[in-house]
Image: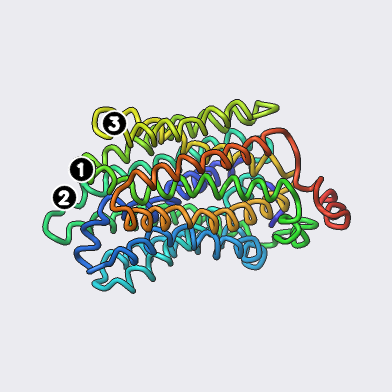
């Protein structure tokens, strides 16, 4: 990673680019959920193939995300971000036009692979360009993440219905390719930032293996994985859960939109609060407690309290911006942040793949949604434990082996 800082005039463009990027880091994964039934009918997709589809984002994050720091060192973080956005745009558009399951899965993977790469690079870009405003900038881009997530959840169905016809879902999915294309523009203007860049000392010496041997690295990965397991199970299947509870496709999309929508204000507030707290344990406990309330409410009163339960589940998913903030706060250097981000997200997303796939399997085995929701409720316990383990200030570089820590401390 480059150690250079943005000049004042260029920081505005970088911030615009970061916000535009963040808006596109979720639609490829969540836009298909509200129209999954239509996609399955049109392509002849089986339940197993639908489970693979919902698991693709987390598999891409786990596999491709681990390569992001090395790729950023090779081509530069700004160029890599532009390439990642191009993959998102191409993947989203082409998948909306194909007529078979395999191409749909392949181009979905291309789109989410771009998302995975950008997702890992983003915290280190913030550390590089805004080292003294990590909480504030994380709050801004976390809010943009939530906005993109909410828009994809709420508007894919209305756009599809407005397009009309049996293939209206294609227009609904293709819309997000346009958004990704627009977001690419500021990054094309930022490509020159990687010319003549100076390598940060130690940036290539903090391997993922070294991070994995630290307690902070392992706990952060487990925390990220367990949170993403919950979130992607929700994003992948809650539209179907609402439909089976008797809600229409549009209403199901709105309820899913409420889950993602409540995270918009929380995504702005939580990183700012976390940046000012010596110990984020109270915040972590409050957010984790929201999951079981929402899940159990959905089991026992799925229609009468649907809005309330959606808001609680949405508040639970806001553990995510807190974890993103901790990635920046639990490393001393940009190199440390990049390594911690890559390890946390690659290992974490590999673990989280169990969520959407497991929920689909449990639903097929039991013929209902109560057992999957109960399992998700039980998994809140280890999520909370890991969250508390990283709530107090500690730094990756302090737990690295002596030779690695020495080079990092000189960065």
Q: Determine crowd level at label 1: few under 14, some 14-19, many 20+ residues with C-alpha closer than 10 A.
A: some
Q: Where is residue 212? Give x, y as percent.
A: 71, 56
Q: Name the outermost residue toward the front.
A: 366
Q: Name the outermost residue toward the left.
A: 165
State the residue in front, 90 or 367.
367
Q: Determine crowd level at label 2: few under 14, some 14-19, many 20+ residues with C-alpha closer than 10 A.
A: some
Question: Nearer the N terminus, badge 3 or badge 1?
Answer: 1
Question: Nearer the N terminus, badge 1 or badge 2?
Answer: 2
Q: Distance between the residues labelled 1 and 2?
A: 9 Å
- For image coordinates 79% across by 57% down, the residue present is 202
Q: Mark 2 points at which residue?
A: 161
- Tell me, for residue 250, which label it has, or none: 1
User: Which mark's residue is nearer the viewer, 2 or 3?
Assistant: 3
Q: Mark 3 points at which residue?
A: 301
User: Which mark's residue is nearer the viewer, 3 or 1?
Assistant: 3
**In-image side of 190 versus 107 (left or right):** right
Residue 397 shows in this picture:
yes
Q: Where is residue 221? Give x, y as percent.
A: 62, 50
Secondary structure under tag 2 reads helix
- Tell me, for residue 171, which label it has, or none: none
Q: From this view, report whether residue 75 is shown above or below residue 311.
A: below
State the residue in front, 280 or 118.
280
- For image coordinates 55% across by 65% down, the residue present is 63
Q: Contact (CB < 8 A) between labels 1 and 2?
A: yes
């Amino acid at each position: 990673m480059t150690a250079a800082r943005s000049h004042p005039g260029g920081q505005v463009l970088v911030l615009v680019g970061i916000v535009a990027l963040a808006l596109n880091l979720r639609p490829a994964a969540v836009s298909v959920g509200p129209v999954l039934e239509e996609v399955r009918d049109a392509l002849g997709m089986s339940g197993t193939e639908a489970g693979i589809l919902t698991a693709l984002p987390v598999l891409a994050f786990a596999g491709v995300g681990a390569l992001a720091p090395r790729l950023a060192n090779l081509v530069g973080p700004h160029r890599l971000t532009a390439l990642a956005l191009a993959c998102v745009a191409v993947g989203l558009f082409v998948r909306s036009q194909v007529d078979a399951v395999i191409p749909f899965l392949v181009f979905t993977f291309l789109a989410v692979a771009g998302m995975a790469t950008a997702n890992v690079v983003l915290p280190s870009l913030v550390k590089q360009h805004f080292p003294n405003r990590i909480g504030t900038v994380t709050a801004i881009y976390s809010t943009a993440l939530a906005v993109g997530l909410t828009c994809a959840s709420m508007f894919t169905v209305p756009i599809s219905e407005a397009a009309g016809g049996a293939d209206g879902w294609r227009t609904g999915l293709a819309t997000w390719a346009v958004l990704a294309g627009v977001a690419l523009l500021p990054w094309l203007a930022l490509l020159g930032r990687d010319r003549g860049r100076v390598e940060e000392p130690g940036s290539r010496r903090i391997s993922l293996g070294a991070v994995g041997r630290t307690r902070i690295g392992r706990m952060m990965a487990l925390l990220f994985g367990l949170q993403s397991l919950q979130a992607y199970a929700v994003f992948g299947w809650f539209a179907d859960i609402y439909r089976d509870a008797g809600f229409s496709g549009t209403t199901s999309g709105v309820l899913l939109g409420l889950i993602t929508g409540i995270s918009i204000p929380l995504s702005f507030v939580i990183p700012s609060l976390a940046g000012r707290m010596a110990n984020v344990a109270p915040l972590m406990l409050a957010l984790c407690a929201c999951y079981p309330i929402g899940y159990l409410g959905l089991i026992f009163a799925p229609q009468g309290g649907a809005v309330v339960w959606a808001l609680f589940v949405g508040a639970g998913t806001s553990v995510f911006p807190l974890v993103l903030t901790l990635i920046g706060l639990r490393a001393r250097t940009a190199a440390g942040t990049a390594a911690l981000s890559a390890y946390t997200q690659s290992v974490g997303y590999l673990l989280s793949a169990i969520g959407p796939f497991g929920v689909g399997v449990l639903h097929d085995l039991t013929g209902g949604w109560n057992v999957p929701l109960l399992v998700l409720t039980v998994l809140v316990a280890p999520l909370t434990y890991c969250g508390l383990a990283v709530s107090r200030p500690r730094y990756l570089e302090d737990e690295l082996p002596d030779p690695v820590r020495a080079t990092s401390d000189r960065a």
